Image: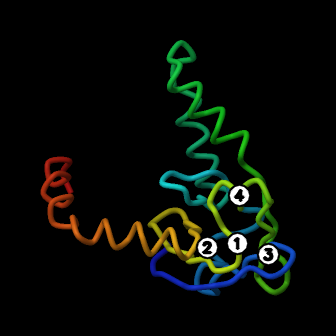
Amino acid sequence: MFLGEYAHGLDNKGRLTIPSRFREELGSPCVVTRGLDQCLFVYPPQEWQALADKLATLPLTQSDARAFVRLLFSGATECELDKQGRILLPPHLRQYAGIDKEVVVIGVSRRIEVWSAAEWEQYSTAAAESYETIAEKIVDLGI
C-alpha cells in the first residue's frame, strides 16, 4: 500500500526519483498515465492490469466510456526504474500535469500520484477546507 507525501524535483532530463518506500511495491516496469485533477497516476504492473481488465468491460456504445479509455491508454507509458530509483516522465505527461521541476509524490493506496508542487498545494488546501463535508458525503458508500 502506498502512503505518504514526498517533495521531489525532476532532473534536467525529466527523471523523477521515486521515494524509496515505494520502489519495491511499485515494481518495474510501472505504468504512468494521465490522472484526474491534473496529476499523473503511477501504477504497479498488476494494478494497471486489473484496471485495464475492468475498463475492458465498459460498453463501447457509451461515448464517455470510449473517451475516458482512449485518453487513459493513449497517455500511458511503461517506465523502468533505473539503478537510482528514477523514472523518466515523458514530455507529454509533464505538460499535461504542469510539471516543471518541483513535484509532490503521494501514495494513494494502490497507486502513486505525481503532482506539480504548485498544483498540489492549491488542491490540498481546497480539499482540506471541505474534508469533513466530503467525509459526510462518502459515508453512505460504506466507508
Residue sitting at 40 percent across and 66 percent down? 123
**SS state under label 1:** loop
Q: Position of residue 46 (x, y in %)?
A: 63, 55
Describe the colour scheme in one phrase. Answer: rainbow
**SS state under label 2:** helix
Q: Are marks 1 and 4 in contact (CB under 8 Å)?
A: no
Cα–Cα span, label 4 and label 2: 27 Å
Of the residues under marks 2 and 1, which one precedes in the sequence?
A: 2
Cα–Cα span, label 1 and label 4: 8 Å
Identified by mark 1, the residue type is: Asp
Q: Relative to 92, is 6 above or below?
A: below
Cα–Cα span, label 2 and label 1: 26 Å
**Of the two numbered discs 3 and 2 in the rendering, the one whose residue sits closer to the viewer:** 3
Identified by mark 3, the residue type is: Arg
Q: Are marks 3 and 2 in contact (CB under 8 Å)?
A: no
Of the residues under marks 3 and 2, which one precedes in the sequence?
A: 3
Identified by mark 4, the residue type is: Gln
Q: Relative to 66, is 99 above or below?
A: below
Left or right of 57: which side holds 16?
right
Q: Position of residue 31 (x, y in %)?
A: 70, 57
Residue tagged by mark 3?
Answer: 15
Of the residues under marks 4 and 2, which one precedes in the sequence?
A: 2
Q: Are marks 1 and 3 in contact (CB under 8 Å)?
A: no
Residue tagged by mark 4?
Answer: 95
**SS state under label 3:** strand
Label 1 Cα neighbours within 10 Å, binned few <14 / some 14-19 / many ≥20? some
Of the residues under marks 4 and 3, which one precedes in the sequence?
A: 3
Residue tagged by mark 1?
Answer: 100
Of the residues under marks 1 and 4, which one precedes in the sequence?
A: 4
